[in-house]
Each structure stands twice: as C-alpha cells, then as structure tokens.
Amino acid sequence: MKHLLAIEGLTRDEATALLDDAAHFSHLLAGRVVRKLPTLRGRTVVTLFYENSTRTRVSFEIAGKWMSADVINVSASSSSTAKGESLRDTALTLRAAGADVIVVRHPASGAAQRIAQWTAEPGGGGPSVVNAGDGTHEHPTQALLDALTLRERLGALEGKRVGIVGDLLHSRVARSGARLFALLGMEVVLVAPPTLIPAGFEGGGIRVSSRLDDELGGLDAVMALRLQAERMNGGFFPSLREYSTLYGLSPKRLDQLKEEAVVMHPGPMNRGVEISDAAADSERSTVLQQVRNGVHVRMAVLYRLLAGAPSLPASEAVPSPAAKEAVHQ
Ligand code: NCD
C-alpha cells in the first residue's frame, strides 16, 4: 500500500487487515508505562493541516511517536501558505525536506489525491500520502477507527445495523463510514432531513431515511454527526432548535434504543444540538473509545505504509518475535 486516500477502492481483506493490526497494536501497548516501539525509527511523518483539528492531528502525532518516527506538524496558518504559497509548492517542499509520509487535511475535496500525484517520483518513489479529511469527500482513518470501535463493542459486524444521523451532505465521516461499514457486511441507514441527504448514496447495503424515530429500535449503533456549519451556506433547515428536536439524540431517544446498542460521535460534539449530555456521557457512548482507537488505527496505517509488511501476525495474545524484539529494544 503506497497511500491511503479513501475507503473507496479498499478491499474487505485490506480493511480487515488494518483493523487486525490496530487491534494488535492496542494489545501490545495495553498497560505499558513506556509506550515506544522502535518500528519507524529514522522515518519522518509530516502532518499538514489546513483545517482545525484536535483528535485527528494529535492521534497521528502520537501514533508516529509511539513508533519512534520523527513527527513534524505544519498548520496552514503558521506555514508559508499564509504568504501565498500554493498547495503544490508546499507539498514539493515537504518532499524535498525529507518527508516519508504526508498526512493532509484540507477543505478541498481531492486535495490528498492531488498531493499524491504531485509528489510521485518515477519508479514508485516519493512520500506516502494519508488523507486525514478532504472537504466533503472522505476521511478513511476515521472510518477505520469507527469500525474498530464497533467491532470491539458489537463483536462480528456482519448483519449488524448502524445508523448515521445528521449532516450527511457535508460529512466526509459519513461518506467513508457508510462505505466501510457496508464493505464489512453491516446494514447502514443514513438518517437526515431531506435537504441534507446527498444524491447517489443508496445501494449496496446502504439505505436512506428521514425519520429517526422509525429507525432507532432496529439499530445496533447510532452515530451522530456535527452540523458542518463551515461548509453550509444557510437554509438547510429552519432552525437549530427544530433540527435538534427532530434529529438530536435526546434522553428520550436513548431509551428507544436496544439494550446493547451503542452511541457514537466522531467529535467535535455540539452538545445540545445533535447529541444530549445524557447520550454523550452514557455507558452506551463510545466517544472516547473512538479517540483511543484512533491512535491504534493510525499506527496500523503508518506501519503499513512505511514498514511495508502485509500484516501483523494474527495472534493477538502472543506477539511475533519481531514485535517482541521491537518492544524490548
Ligand atoms: C470530523 C472531521 O473533521 O471530518 N472530525 C474528526 O475528524 N473527528 C467531523 C467534524 O468535523 O464534525
């Protein structure tokens, strides 16, 4: 695997192998005081963020550092972008400076793909590119960490039903998540006001609904999405209050869920809009487990791109000799 630009194009086996590796890293590091593997020593990861981020940027940085990579964070506001440099020139500069991986978040859909094209060298050289969210297009590592969380909480995913509720039109999390969950055999229900449902989403295990209350009782997991106000130009629904009344995960809606169903949110949460305090802080909530899994999933992705191994050993209980050596060095 040279790049991770989207869930689209990933096979079920590739996705499952990444989830297995992430689970393996989680197991390997559990309970350790010193969380440092030498796996990526001497490799350089640059995070290039043109949009605000807390969990995605931090978890890529922690993932790289726990594997001993050198991690450098660049944000648009403090880079030469503020002086008018183009995205292409910035990407070529990072390649020239020695980046092995460029993790990019950008408001334009397709930005990660473009960087991968611009920085490619003949013979397959050039840095690997990871899409950490491009406009309204995709956010593949978010989908992977969500799938890992679902697997931990629900067991086998085949046939389980997940509802993704909210601003589907502007959500790269929904786009990547729906694709991956369906790829892994889940039933996906996308729930939103008709104005926030993008065209062409249905089919292949994915269906669309505008009536949250009709769906809640059949779900094994429900994921609330933030209203992406920064990507809206107004007029998608009458008022925040009405949106919240019809689509917010209120305490009453929490009671309509099956006993073992979980509540997810990719963060950042707007409490009181798409999710109530009761839902965000309940036993069902996976919000912080998702963040923790984000580190392990990003370790698995960096490992796959840089160490090039097909997969870590399947056994989670007994680390491979290589992994053992990695820990004890
Ligand atoms: C999301 C994003 O930036 O796409 N957040 C995240 O990465 N956890 C969702 C959002 O901003 O609402």
Image: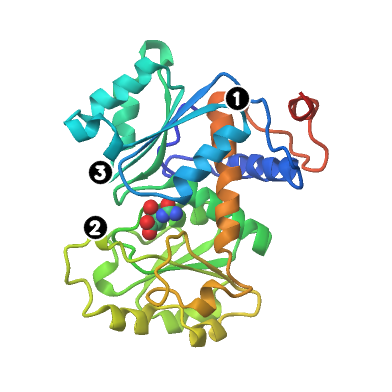
Looking at the image, which residue is at 42% across and 73% down? 271
Q: Secondary structure at mark 2?
A: helix
Residue at position x 29%, y 48% in the image = 135
User: Split into 4 quadrants, where in the image is the C terminus?
Assistant: top right
Q: Quadrant of ligand 1?
A: bottom left
Residue 93 sits above or below residue 12 on the image: above
Residue 259 image-quadrant placement: bottom right
Decide: is 329 above or below 219. above
Mark pair 1, 2: CA separation: 36 Å
Q: Does any portion of residue 184 appear in the rendered image?
A: no
**Cα–Cα span, label 2 and label 3:** 11 Å
Q: For disc 2, does the CB lie below 8 Å from ligand 1?
A: no
The span from disc 1 to disc 3 (Cα, nearest Å) is: 30 Å
* Left or right, 193 with reference to 144: left
Q: Does label 2 or label 3 sit earlier along the sequence?
A: 3
- Label 3 belongs to which residue? 108
**Which callout, 1 or 3, points to the residue nearer the camera?**
1
125 in relation to 140, above or below: above
Query: Which residue bears the numbered disc 2?
Result: 231
Where does the image place residue 183, in percent across and percent down from the top left? 51, 51
Which residue does the numbered mark 1 point to in the structure image? Answer: 40
Q: Is residue 99 above or below residue 281?
A: above
Amino acid type of the residue that numbered disc 2 sits on in the rendered structure: Arg
Question: Furthest residue to the right?
Answer: 318
